[in-house]
Image (cartoon, grey):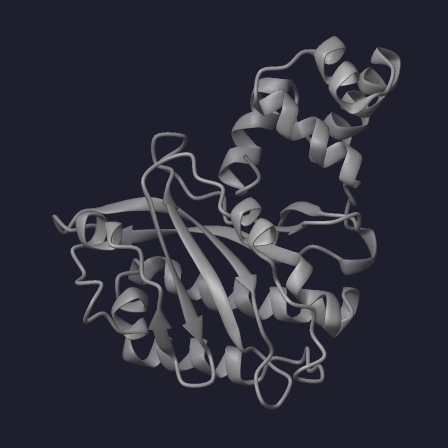
Amino acid sequence: MENELQKLYKVWDSDPNRGIPGTEPRVDFNDLANAIVSTGPFYCYIVDFTNMSLSHVKPSIQHILGLNPEKIAFKDVLEAIHPDDMDFVIKAEAFLGNFFFKNVEPARVMKYKSSFNFRMRLADGEYALFNHQAMMLTLGPDGGFGKALNIHTRIDHLNPTNNYRMSVICMDDSPSFLNLSLNSDYANMARFSQKEIQIIKNLGDGLDSNAIAEKLFISPHTVKKHRKNILEKSGCKNVAELIKNSAMNGLL
């Protein structure tokens, strides 16, 4: 595991997405509140990648993982990842770093959150599947990773098996990218508009097309057209599958 952790640190240290520290937009409370999507028991913390320290650790981490929030180190969280999932975590972090470098201006990285799943060791020693959501809060001194909000939500009640997929979700009007694989081609990724993301979230809340149309001030016909496009882009056969996958992707 020590060797795998070194590989993960190396990925973060070699982040290609260098910006200019101090020029990044301030992340406000609403952005943080909207970023925290939980469909089950969760904990969160802020990690400072410049020194790998943790702050603002939610006390629920002790009940879920058995880790003392007052004494916890980042290494303790990483060592709780299932050894068989560590390779995917390393590759996912590298993939997402390159994704942001190729697709997002450094000053806008703070407007996105990334999401993927892996198994974590619970307080009782058993493993369960968690959804990992990460939102960058600041850039580091060299323009790389600074501070990030990490949210880990237990999702094995949705599906005990990892789908080994990633999502990049925008919190303003730029496109989002869902259900990405490690082999996804940057140029051919399906882009989901802000309106499509709003519709997915409303479907997750149980609203039908008429209710969504009224809420978003668009016609029911437009909603139905969006729903058809969403299913085609996501590769889902129906709304039930879409909602399940969206929940596993940290969107709902």
Total marks in image: 0
Can see residue 121? no
User: Is 218 above or below relative to 50?
Assistant: above
Q: With 124 as the anchor, is 194 left or right in this view?
A: right
- The single residue placed furthest to the front in the displayed view is 29
Residue at 57% over, 21% down: 205
- Residue at 76%, 65% (x, y): give it: 104
At 16% from the left edge and 55% from the top edge, which residue is drawn? 66
Q: Is residue 34 visible?
A: yes
Which of the two residues, 141 or 30, is positioned nearer the viewer here?
A: 30
The one nearer the camera, 9 or 61, is 61
Image spot of residue 131 (x, y percent): 43, 47
Q: Residue furthest bottom?
A: 142
Place of residue 61 in the rendered image (x, y in percent of width and height, measured from the top left): 25, 54
Quadrant of the frame with the C terminus: top right
Q: Is residue 177 left or right of 126 when viewed as pictured?
A: right
Image position, residue 89 (x, y; %)? 45, 63
Residue that appears at 79% across and 45% down: 191
Task: Locate the N terminus by quadrant.
Answer: bottom left
Residue 201 percent location from the top left of the image:
63, 29
Q: Quadrant of residue 128?
A: top left
Q: Residue furthest left?
A: 124
In the figure, is residue 94 to the left or right of 57?
right
Answer above or below: position of 93 versus 48.
Answer: above
